[in-house]
Amino acid sequence: MYKFFVEDNQINNDKIVINNDDYNHIANVLRMKKGDTILITNKNSKETFNCEIEEVKSNEIVCNILNKENKKVELEVKIDLYQGLPKADKMEYIIQKSVELGVNKIVPVNMKYCIAKIKDEEKKNIRWNKISEVAAKQCKRNIIPKIDKSINMDTLYNEIKKYDLVIVAYENEENITLKTALRESAKIKNIAVVVGPEGGFSLEEVDKLRENGAKIVSLGNRILRTETAPIALLSMLVYEYEL
Ligand code: SAH
């Protein structure tokens, strides 16, 4: 079943009105008609409803709420990904796959060995958030993970202090594995995961992350590409916390 997101003001008692970009998608691309069913999530309350299309008008679609959908889709542990800024198309891949794997939010980070520099960040950020929204609809998430504006390392050192657990995937870590780090951690509600760019982390960056409470871990004996590492790491966390 197709899933769409709406704002509070599109919901009125047992009816939901779709009059934005999704109108075109539902009416003209999917050619849905009266009686067809869709899933609709309220962006604010994150509640999801099974709905039936009541009428496809020339500029809006009116849906009837049939019932509330209680299927669990979100991970119990919130995982935020801090990703060393990779080259452009890789970031898009990382966003799409991370959203499928349940990430809560993604923050691009400028690191010492980043090869890429973001040009026209305003535009890119809008595009990245759109990619997140499309992926969230496709995999039927109850939230649209936010893609933040990029931050620098000094901000990151501060930011990680608010998490129950901070995992840094480090290509040169030989002793501590992700498994060990997770076994050492008591019950947690949120995790920050940090992945380096194509050029990896500098020694100083790893030291400072450690000083600020991060656990530095290995994801295995092979070097993964910067776009593989977050996907592998998130899959491992889904295995740990959901399966
Ligand atoms: N240029 C570096 C590799 C960078 S890989 C080199 O040649 O050594 C990009 C990022 O993916 C790394 O910074 C790290 O965050 C993650 N990564 C890749 N392989 C990893 C592994 N085996 N264990 C932990 N993290 C890894």
Image (cartoon, rainbow, N blue to C red):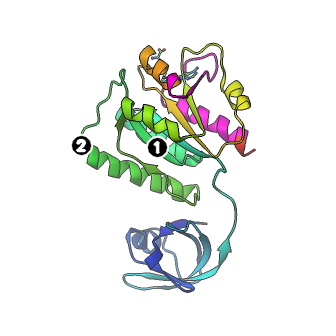
Residue sitting at 66 percent across and 35 percent down?
Answer: 236
The answer for how far apart the CA atoms under marks 1 and 2 are is 18 Å
In the displayed structure image, the side of residue 221 where residue 115 appears, left or right: left
Q: Which quadrant holds residue 65?
A: bottom right
In the image, 175 versus 144, the foreground residue is 175
Q: Name the residue under label 2.
A: 120
Q: Mark 1 points at which residue?
A: 106
In the image, 193 versus 4, the foreground residue is 193
Residue 216 covered by magenta stretch: yes
Residue sitting at 52 percent across and 80 percent down?
Answer: 33
Residue 231 covered by magenta stretch: yes
Q: Earlier in the sequence, mark 1 or mark 2?
A: 1
In the image, 130 versus 193, the foreground residue is 193
Q: Position of residue 110 (x, y in %)?
A: 35, 31
Which label number is shown at residue 176? Answer: none
**Three-letter amino acid code of the residue under disc 1:** Ile
Mark 1 or 2: the one toward you: 1
Label 1: element kind: strand
